[in-house]
Image (cartoon, helix red, strand yellow):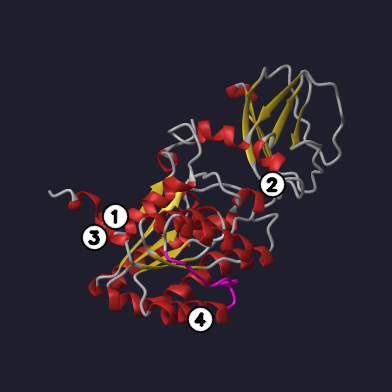
Amino acid sequence: MSSGEGFKVSSLKDKVTLITGASSGIGAGTSIMFAKLGALLALNGRDVENLTNIAKQCTDLGAAEPLLVPGDLTNEDTVKKTVELTIAHFGRLDVLINSAGILAMGSIETGDLAQYDKVMNVNVRSVYHLTQLCVPHLIRTKGSIVNVSSVNGQRSFPGVLAYCMSKSAIDQFTRCIALELASKQVRVNSVCPGVIITDVHRRAGLDEEQYAQVTYYVIQGPKHIVLQGCVHWMTFQNVCTVYCKMSMFRELMAYYMTENVVSHLVIMQYLSVSPNALTCSLLPRLSFSPFSSLLPLQFLEKCKQTHALGRPGEVEEVAHAIAFLASDAATFITGVNLPVDGGRHAMCPR
């Protein structure tokens, strides 16, 4: 093998690449990664200021000036304009990266149809529409598509129902169109990240302090268990079930959902307790009894337990996987939903 054959990811040089969701998170990181690899970029995002900043970072790396095609892809005219401007500017399309997406907290009890429609429109419908319009151009170049999915599409998590459904749809979408386009030599794959350090959770409702410092608290006392969220008491508008198996397992599982503070965020926390010394108090009107201990649980700290590698991921790690799948290093790979999740997809609760 020659030295050149060992770096086939460099085949992305001069490839016309349309990246959605490029104004933040994985889309932004992928834009910068592809700029380093010499790709010709068309960048879509809703935040024009952030998108402009990402474009500057790309040119600072020596890349050609990206074409900016900002806009909300749930608008059908914006989708059509995005493809038309890209083809008019570059004359072709080699790679499509569908990275635009939103996360919304909510269960079958707390979510509503407006939230469901918003998540599915952004995460699924817009991806379907944009890909549909890009396919004729990708067939001409025998190009590739990489969709940004999530471990939530492969594993089930309570409290993010619409999001999980949307990512399962993207995984199936990826596999189906991979088979449909294989005879035309267009490859289609997806990456399925675990928790990645981006702003997606903040945009879902967590502010900076909640996200990075003290997202959850569990208050434990000799006679009562109550839950505290973030930095102040929650109002339990919809109290979910509390399962007590203390007599058998000597532990309490408190599984809850709220309408505020953390925007329906769910936590499942196991506490080892004495079955005779503890009662459960999870009521809409909380009584403030004296408590014996305060147990902080940080959102990112929790990733040490939920990810086999013991940490959350970095945007660049996902961008590397996307670049690999889009490049000639992966010419015999199609229809793959690739976990980039530190082993989270392989784990089971114990």
Q: Where is residue 208 in the image (x, y as percent from the top left)?
A: 69, 43
Which secondary structure, mark 1? helix
Q: Where is residue 210 in the image (x, y as percent from the top left)?
A: 70, 40
The first of marks 4 and 3 along the sequence is: 4
Q: Position of residue 246 (x, y in %)?
A: 64, 24
- The amino acid type found where label 2 is placed reads Leu
Q: For the point 56% across and 66% down, which residue is it?
A: 45
Tag shown at residue 331 = 3
Nearest to the eye among marks 1 and 3: give it: 1
Q: Does the magenta stretch include residue 69?
A: yes
Q: Name the residue under label 2.
A: 206
The first of marks 1 and 2 along the sequence is: 1
Q: Decide: marks 4, 1 in contact (CB < 8 A)?
A: no
Nearest to the eye among marks 1 and 2: give it: 1
Q: Mark 4 points at which residue?
A: 80
| Mark 2 to mark 3 CA distance (whole Å) | 40 Å
Instruction: Judge the density around disc 3: few (<14), some (14-19), many (≥20) Cα neighbours within 10 Å.
Output: some
Instruction: Judge the density around disc 2: few (<14), some (14-19), many (≥20) Cα neighbours within 10 Å.
Output: some
- The amino acid type found where label 4 is placed reads Lys
Number of labels in the image equals: 4
Asked whether residue 292 is in view, the answer is yes
Nearest to the eye among marks 4 and 1: give it: 1
Q: Which of 324 and 121 is in front in this view?
A: 324
- The amino acid type found where label 3 is placed reads Thr
Q: Position of residue 214 (x, y in %)?
A: 70, 34
Q: Is residue 174 magenta?
A: no
- Magenta segment, principal secondary structure? loop
| Mark 4 to mark 3 CA distance (whole Å) | 29 Å
Q: Name the residue under label 1.
A: 9
Is 315 rendered above or below residue 108? above
Q: What stretch is highlighted in magenta?
A: 64-75
The first of marks 4 and 1 along the sequence is: 1
